[in-house]
Image (cartoon, helix red, strand yellow):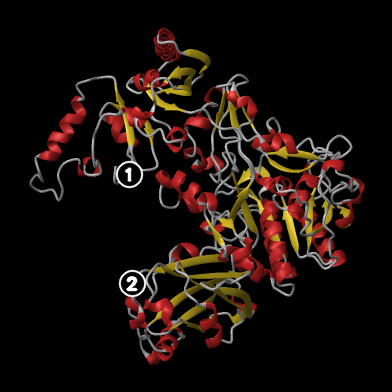
Amino acid sequence: MSGALLEEEWANVGLTVLSSDEDRTLVLFSSSEELGEFRRKLNAYGQGTPGGQKNPSYAAFIANVEAIAEVSPRDRIGVRAREAGLVEADDFRSGEIYVLDIELWDLGHRALRERKLDDIARYADARGAEELDRHIGPNITMLRLRCDGAVARTLLNVEEIAEVDLPPEPDLVTGNLIDLTLGELPERSEVDDELPLIGVIDSGVNDHPLIEDIIAGAIAVPETLGTADEWGHGTFVGGMATFGDLRAQLSQGSLIRYARLCSAKVVDNHGCFPNARLVPRLMREAITRLHEEFGCRIFVIALGDRKKLIEGTKVGPWAQTLDELVRELDIVIIVSAGNHSPRGGGRIEEAVTEYPRYLLEPGNRLCEPAGGMNIVTVGALAHGNGLGPQANDDVDLRPITEANEPSPFSRVGPGARGAIKPDFTDIGGTLIYNGRAIELQGGEAWPEAGAMSLYYRPIDRLFATYSGTSYAAPLVAFKASQILARFPDASANLVRVLLASSSNPPEEAVRRLAPLGDKAALDVCGHGLVDVERAVFSDDARVILYAEDDLAVDHFAVYQIPIPEAFQTERGRRTIRISLAYDPPVRHSRLDYNGISMGFRLIRGCTPDLIFEHFRQRTSDEGPFPKVENRFNCDLTPSSTLREKSSLQTASVVFSRDIQNYGDTYYLVVRCAGGWAGDTGHQAFAVTVEISHEAEVQLYERLRQRTRVRV
């Protein structure tokens, strides 16, 4: 298909969609060989345009069909087999033994699928194959065989078979790491007292031997809670905030603490808020105290109200309180997007078969407070398929994701007023389907499926693994702390904008979400995965210019952007990326949640006088403002309509042709527009411009010679 998948239209002509792939290929099944209704519509379309119509009959349906063909043997070869070089049926060699997972199409009721599976198993047995395992569930029907390559070639021609693939490869690393003892660990790094603090607003952080010397302080709100972490959540979150990817560190033989911690315990030993306190007041007191008593400027809140979802464009008082604190205290607050079990009961297998479609269901929207505007919201990515060594013997264990695909439990945006949310995504683990237990299981059951961090009872064991967006949020807090370490005087807006300027959705996630529409990746991944090295350093062919500034309401600023000649003329993809962060006043009772709006435009090829005359406010006597022709506007993506719903914005334009006709100076226009808070006076903001060339073109020195902006 070249257009929409139109699953309902296929059902209307008697065809069932068995699968839809990333390249917009559909596999269809018909219980009738005649295909009468489909043929009737094809014939009507082929008759041309009837009188009185603009298009042929059924054009919206048929015109999007690029080709129709039968499923061939090579179409049934799975991705793992193809990656191993088994691309065509003849690549399966006679005399060579393969262990294969065979999956049938979901052709109907269980008895029919079971009968087909029995037929295939009997045939394979007669050809000398060995059945190792099988699984027949509500939607998934699988058989694992050990067989000769000649048998595999034959099976690729069986119509009822959807896929023949090599078994998933397990992650054998985590299971070994999780059992390490203190004496087996690499030496811990020393921590400078000048390193930034990360405040963990959670269930407390215990004096674990790997972090006890870097906990600057702990409080409880209210004090009757005590500061000990008896739930285990806060210690796990704190470990990720200071170590980052602990699994990767231990695999490389290192143990480096990159930040210090302080803790505010706000939930009891069962993870519940105290009944005697309102959550907004609780949050305000906890964050304000950690800020005042310890100087903390980065906070992570991996908690949420899963019963209160973002409805339409409105958020609740919890989100508003956090947004207010960001503005009042000049701090960065990072929250998790929230978790949602994708399927349960009799539909549990759909967690595998319907992935990733269910991520965009209304019931999977962000929960409070993740929809806030000034806070940073984080969704989760899988680090792999989550399978351990047991998967070698058990076909009942089925993966849902591969590396860098969205976690199946991660909630999605948009946020307040339709803002792009989550802002970022990071590793939070995955789920696997256990057909024997008929359950979805994460890192709690399988170490390889979860994110890895510190266990709250180190006497029992040092490490644990869990799956959830709660564990993606502290990874972004960790990255924010590295930006603050590099720029200790940076405003919260600058930290946020540098996170945005260095982020991109993983290619694997974009490919997996592509069939769900152009906006799916934004709603699930936001601006993407932050690359902290790109956030804090320029290099020869990629330069970041930044500014911290403020604007009076209903005013604008114009920045000159120097464009080196090499960027204008050298062949290859060249990119300019603009990012903006500001922290407007907010009020959740209003439809227009933020009281001030900001946006930006990138203009080239015209004079500064024209730009100023175009954007400045004019009296009625002055007449209409002079227009800036469209060819002078850089076509930034995402569009201003979409990005200006957010207080954290990033957009880019890519050039591949010679652009020297537009000159060596572009102009960035940043505008501040007042709403209900128009009498506020001034609005602080931070802005970055990234100029990059895919070739090794020396941009850094050329730009530094032409600009006074800090590089």
Quadrant in which residue 288 is drawn: bottom right
What mark, if any, has residue 451 been given in the picture?
A: none
- From the viewer's perspective, is 422 left or right of 138? right
Residue 296 point in image, percent of width and height: 80, 64
Q: Nearer the viewer, residue 405 or 640?
A: 405
At mark 2, the secondary structure is loop
| Residue drawn at point x = 78 percent, y = 49 percent | 239
User: Label 1 sits on what residue type?
Assistant: Ala
Earlier sequence position, callout 1 versus callout 2: 1
| Residue drawn at point x = 57 percent, y = 36 percent | 385
- From the viewer's perspective, is 596 left or right of 205? left
Q: Is residue 231 above or below residue 517?
A: above
Q: Nearer the viewer, residue 177 or 474?
A: 177
Q: Quick check: can you spot residue 632?
A: yes
Check disc 2 and report the residue beneath it: 657
User: Label 2 sits on what residue type?
Assistant: Arg
- From the viewer's perspective, is 342 left or right of 316? left
Residue 191 point in image, percent of width and height: 84, 61
- Quadrant location of the C terminus in the rendered image: bottom right
At mark 1, the secondary structure is loop
What mark, if any, has residue 4 been given in the picture?
A: 1
Outermost front residue: 95
